[in-house]
Image: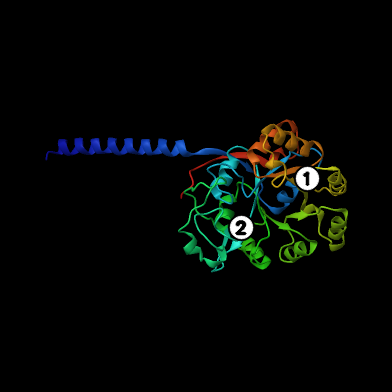
Amino acid sequence: MSSKQTQKRAFVLLILLYSIGVIAGQDLLAQTKTIHTYKIKNTKQLHDFFRYTGDDIPLISGHRGGMVEGFPENSIETFENTLSHTPAFFEIDPRLTKDSVIVLMHDATLDRTTTGKGKLADYTYDELKQFTLRDPQGNVTPYKIPTLAEAIEWARGKTILNLDKKDVPMEMIAAIIRKHKAASFVMLTVHTPEQARFYLDRNKHHMFSAFVKTPEAFEAYVRAGIPWSQVMAYVGPENNKGVKTMYELLHAEGVKCMISSAPTYDKLEDPAARKKAYQAIIQDGADVIESDLPIEAAQAIVPFIPSTSSKKKFFSTMITAPLIK
């Protein structure tokens, strides 16, 4: 073969490879998306983000990430889908496998949310890999059960995770947050001031989503010396006259208040009724809505986002590459 023929073939091959690269690049670009993020770099900023000031932007917490057709609860794919529509943080459920790997699963059993059967604790993590997750309608998806470690690393630089209390010992939860240096974006649900004190004794900077539903509970946190600057208060699932007393007590201490609509208003069949309920929650004094329908709840409360807020500095966007399955 002459040198000219060799050069011609090399040129054709180069053009072919370039074309393939362009097509692949275009395909990758098509799969990227813009998501809403929080710009929080340290625990002080996390505390400031949740501090009640009176000019705050209403917040949305995706209960188990959200409940949308095609997207399973407690999955990274669902978290990212929610963030593609609205800023949000996520309440998630850590549980232990047979070999003590912390995974995300609300139920103690696999039947409702996966293609598996029986108790999660009867399976090792490697055994769980054979199953895939189901969406809220029971449809099988290609998505796998994530570990808490995977969720933490995915959330870094994007959002905040709120770890509910299931069957994982608190010492293990404290250890994984410490291992991943994640206290600036992982907060802890606590039901009592004693639980909060346990975590504070291991890291004085932890942020809490604390059950403070009554004046008596409020006083218990005061007696325990839990710093209000590190508390967001869960005040219950219903927006009623009783919670207004809690709003007054907690706002006076700079504490944001959260209503969970997951067991109540999210169940309303009429979308207009749900919208009205979400709007009333914010109008009546709550600062955070935790919802199974975070995208819908976020859309409903857009009119209540202040035009100016000292908290806008915490909100941003980023372009993400497709998740690798």
Q: Give the side of residue 291 with respect to residue 5, left or right.
A: right
Colour setting: rainbow
Residue wearing tag 1: 238
- Which residue lies under the disc numbered 2? 107
Label 2: which secondary element = loop
**For residue 165, what is the image quadrant?**
bottom right
Q: Residue furthest left?
A: 1
Q: Name the one closer to the observer, 180 or 292.
A: 292
Left or right: where does residue 184 sit relative to residue 109?
Answer: right
Judged from the image, the secondary structure of the residue bearing numbered disc 1 is: loop
Residue 123: % across, % down? 52, 65
Q: Residue at x 72, y 63 (%)?
A: 199
Q: Nearer the viewer, residue 313 or 224?
A: 224
Q: Quadrant of the N terminus?
A: top left
From this viewpoint, is residue 87 visible? no
Type of amino acid under label 2: Asp
